[in-house]
Each structure stands twice: as structure tokens, then as C-alpha cells.
Amino acid sequence: MDEDNEIQEIRRRKLEALQEHQTNEDAQEQVQQQEDQQRQGMLRKILTPEARERMARLKIARADFAEAVENQLIMLAQSGQLKNMIDDANLVQILERLTPEKREITIKRR
């Protein structure tokens, strides 16, 4: 009987630990969703619909680069350096300036 009580106690502790871990994950996920909603709200104020669409396509292709560009745009807007909304043409120019030049690799056979 004593062993049964110990096993039950161990099971109860494990269950509590799992529930606490799940609660922490849920809270982190909720915070992440709120941050993402705030980012999207800021981007709606900064970018025209066409520019937002381009950023969405860029995010699919190069997520890390798109996130870095979004962060820079948000920082510029928060510091007051952006006066107007960025349209698609302006966004293309910004992306061209930020995109590193590609190195061309040639292979010579002998």
C-alpha cells in the first residue's frame, strides 16, 4: 500500500509539472501573438496595401530578411523619421538598397 501511495504521489507531481509547463507555453504563445498583432498594426500604418502584400511575399521567401526590414521600418516610424506611408515603389527601392549584391560564381573546366 505504501508503494501505491508513493506511485500516486509521483504521478500527481508529474501531472502538475506538465500542467504548469503547458500553462507557461500558453502564456508565451499569447504574448507572442500580441506582439505580432502590434507589429502588424504598426506596419498597416507604415505601408500601403500593395507594399504590405510585397512584404508578405518576401516573408514567405526570405523570412529572416523580411523581419529585419520590418524591424527597421518600425524603428524609423517610431523615431519619427518616416513622414509618409511607404508605397510599393518606395519599398522596392528600400529592398534593393538593403539586399546584398550577389556574387557570381563561375566554374572553369580544364
Image (spheres, rainbow, N blue to C red):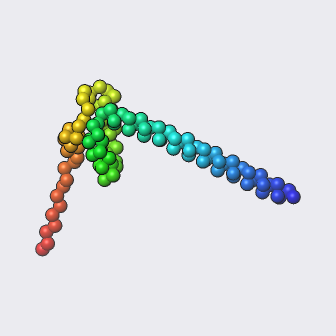
| 76 in relation to 52, above or below | above
Residue 83 picture location, percent across and down: 25, 27
Look at 26% across and 32% down and name the residue there.
85
Residue 27 figure quarter: top right
Q: Is residue 48 left or right of residue 19?
A: left
- Residue located farthest toward the bottom when viewing the structure as drawn: 110
Spot the residue most to the right: 1
Q: Nearer the viewer, residue 88 or 12?
A: 88
User: Quadrant location of the C terminus?
Assistant: bottom left
Rendered residue at 38%/35% (across/down):
41
Image position, residue 105 (x, y; %): 17, 61
Could you tell whether 2 is left or right of 9 in the image? right
Residue 82 rendering spot, x and y as whole percentages: 26, 29
Which is nearer the eye, 12 or 103? 12
Residue located at (19% from left, 50% from top): 101
- Viewer can see residue 62: no
Question: Is 64 situated left or right of 95 in this image?
Answer: right
Q: Is residue 109 left or right of residue 49?
A: left
Quadrant of the image for the N terminus?
bottom right
Residue at (29% x, 31% y) in the render: 76
Q: Is residue 34 visible?
A: yes
Q: Which quadrant of the structure image shows residue 69?
A: top left
| In the image, residue 37 above or below residue 59 | above
Q: Is residue 62 above or below residue 34?
A: below
Give x and y (percent) for residue 60.
33, 52
For the residue pair 44 and 99, the one nearer the viewer reads as 44
